[in-house]
Amino acid sequence: MMRVTNQCRIIRLASVVFISFLVSACGNSSSNQANNQIDYTKNYPATTGGTLIDAMTGEPSGLIAMIAGESAASAIASNIFNSLLKYDKNLDITGELAQSWEVSNDQKTITFHLKPNLKWADSQPLTSDDVLFTWQKVTDKKTRTPYGSDFKLVTKAEAPDINTFRVTYAAPYAPALDTWAGLHILPKHLLKNQDINNTTFARNPIGSHYYKLDSWKNGQYLKLIRNPNATQGQAKIDTLLSRIIPDKAAQFLELSADNIDSMGLNPIQYARIFPARPDLNKNIALYKELGNSYTYLGFNLKRKPFDDIRVRQAINYAINKQEIIDGVLLGLGEPVASPYKPGTRWSNPALKPYAYDPNKAKALLKEAGYEDHDGDGILDKDGKPFTFEILTNQNKEREMTAVLIQPTSQRNRN
């Protein structure tokens, strides 16, 4: 983890979220591109075959997502494994392995009916017993996973026949269906006698989705090929190749050289480099949309002073969100008041982000006992200055944010 220490009068960042997700994709790369420009407003017939090459900044630690925990693992594993449910293009829950499901009148029991004749990539049958096994593993206290809590709310799980899986909760649980859209179902016949925390299966998985792992070269790439037994039908693209390129600048050079087909752009690449390089627009199709991800600063509520809600609120009021959006994201983002994407049905338009109000922040901190008692410009309480550390990874945008949230006097000292 990258550690940034901030010694400041007021450090500002809290449950505010902001980020813009930018994606670029290659278009026709022929030398006669100007005369053969693809018209992206038209619908073209689907074709099969080919290889799609993308870039990843991090390498997965393994491909059992519940154990690995990082986004790189989930990105690859989601092409190998299925869940009972999934979200469709309208963000509605629909079946993946499940053909249908019913919720009991008391809202405590969900009965899933699997699609018939499902198979794993090794041609073994995929049944409700695999689903039950996966639930047992994610809730096992010996399994080192951060995702078990939702599934531990299930008081009873059973597989009455090969195509039926039933769970019962102690009380109605609103996000229940959502949780089953996020759990990759694992093969019991390959994992039942293994320690899921340390199994070689994580490096050589057998799944049920569109693709199966063909090869994995440490520090270089992961290659997926079509799974002939895919439960959702055959994929259009033959091969997915994910190259591991930690540096975004290096990724961009590879994109420009036509060595990769797609990547996520950072704000500088999108807002500064492309406008200055008309030649890039001939070969690369550029897309911008509000992303599904968000960035936030979390607090350890077991530690002082973050156990005091007034301190947490003060930090939020002390943030100039627009300064961060303009300075770090070059305007390509927006503040939000919840972890849900604006415009989706989960986002409450009546909720507004905390306003930038330093005076309100100071008042709350004073109420919590923090004042400048010795005239050095730093708030303190019981003789201890109000300082804390922000821990982050090597994400440059977060590092720049940590600098911006310091008072001007502290920035100048640094």
Image (spheres, grey):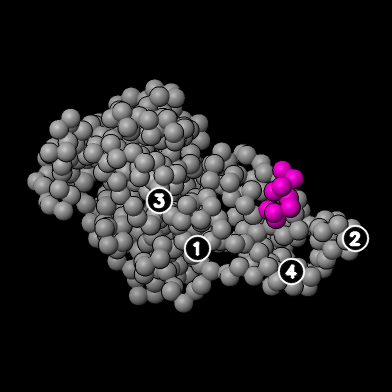
Dots 3, 4 in contact, CB < 8 A: no
**Marks 2/4: CA distance?**
16 Å
In the rendered image, the residue lying farthest to the bottom is: 350
Q: Is residue 154 above or below residue 244?
A: below
**Marks 3/4: CA distance?**
34 Å
Whether residue 77 is visible to the viewer of this picture, yes or no, is no
**Marks 2/1: CA distance?**
36 Å
> Is residue 408 on the magenta stretch?
yes
Instruction: Locate residue 77, reporting x and y percent.
Output: 37, 39
Compare marks 3 and 1 and give the one earlier in the sequence. Answer: 3
Instruction: Report the residue marked by disc 3.
Output: 21
The residue shown at (56%, 38%) is 394
Q: Amino acid at mark 3?
A: Phe
Q: Is residue 230 above or below residue 253?
A: below
The residue shown at (11%, 47%) is 44
The residue shown at (39%, 33%) is 251
Q: Which residues are magenta?
A: 406-414
In the rendered image, the residue lying farthest to the left is: 45
Q: Where is the N terminus found, in terms of image quarters? A: top right
Instruction: Report the residue marked by disc 4.
Output: 362
Q: Amino acid at mark 4?
A: Lys
Q: Nearer the viewer, residue 162 or 247?
A: 247
Question: Magenta span: helix, strand or loop, mainly?
Answer: helix
What's the mark number on residue 412?
Answer: none
Which element carries disc 1, helix, strand or loop? loop
Instruction: Report the residue marked by disc 1.
Output: 335
Q: Nearer the viewer, residue 130 or 50?
A: 50
Compare marks 4 and 1 and give the one earlier in the sequence. Answer: 1
